[in-house]
Image (cartoon, rainbow, N blue to C red):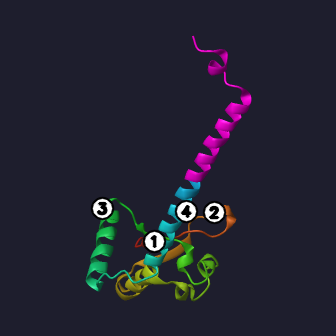
Amino acid sequence: MPGLDELIPNAAQIRKEAALKEAEKAEEYARLAAAAEGEKRALIERLTKPSGKTEEEKIQLASTIIQRAVRNGQTQVQVYRFPNTLCTDKGRAINQQEKGWENTLTGIPKEIFQLWTDYLKPRGYRIAYQIIDFPGGVPGDVGVTISWGDD
């Protein structure tokens, strides 16, 4: 039969083992957080650049998204969501509904607005860019919605 010290280690030893486990968990969390932050930076970097899609590809994509929404009985559809950091003012003008807010757009969000201006607006579609979450009470992601209903 094992000795009592093997069955019930002393409290100091248990605390030491628990501290090591906590340190390992903290290290793993920090590593994962750093990796996620790196991925987020890479995504934002990619989104600030043009999509590389042709006008025809963009129109086809918009058509597919809108037709799917119509088949599901919807009169609007969120077509995109992006971090507010893709706006030159971090989404302030969008949040305040200021005239000229579209001039703060960059990258793919700007491409979407241009596609709407060139092809969808003349056909009666509406577009809305709005802050859709407020982490910590400050503006976060921006949602882009295309609508075609009577409202």
Q: What's the residue type where badge 1 is placed?
A: Leu
Say which mark, if any, is on residue 71. Answer: 3
Mark 4 to mark 1: distance in Å? Answer: 14 Å
Say which mark, if any, is on residue 34. Answer: 4
- The N terminus is located in which quarter? top right
**First in sequence: mark 3 vs mark 4:** 4
Q: Main secondary structure of the magenta part?
A: helix
- Magenta part of the chain: 1-28
**First in sequence: mark 4 vs mark 1:** 4
- In terms of secondary structure, where does tag 1 sit? helix
Given contact means CB atoms under 8 Å apart, are the residues at marks 2 and 1 in contact? no
Q: What's the residue type where badge 2 is placed?
A: Pro
Mark 2 or 1: the one toward you: 1
Given contact means CB atoms under 8 Å apart, are the residues at marks 4 and 1 in contact? no
Looking at the rendered structure, the number of numbered marks drawn on it comes to 4
Is-magenta flag for residue 7?
A: yes
**First in sequence: mark 2 vs mark 1:** 1
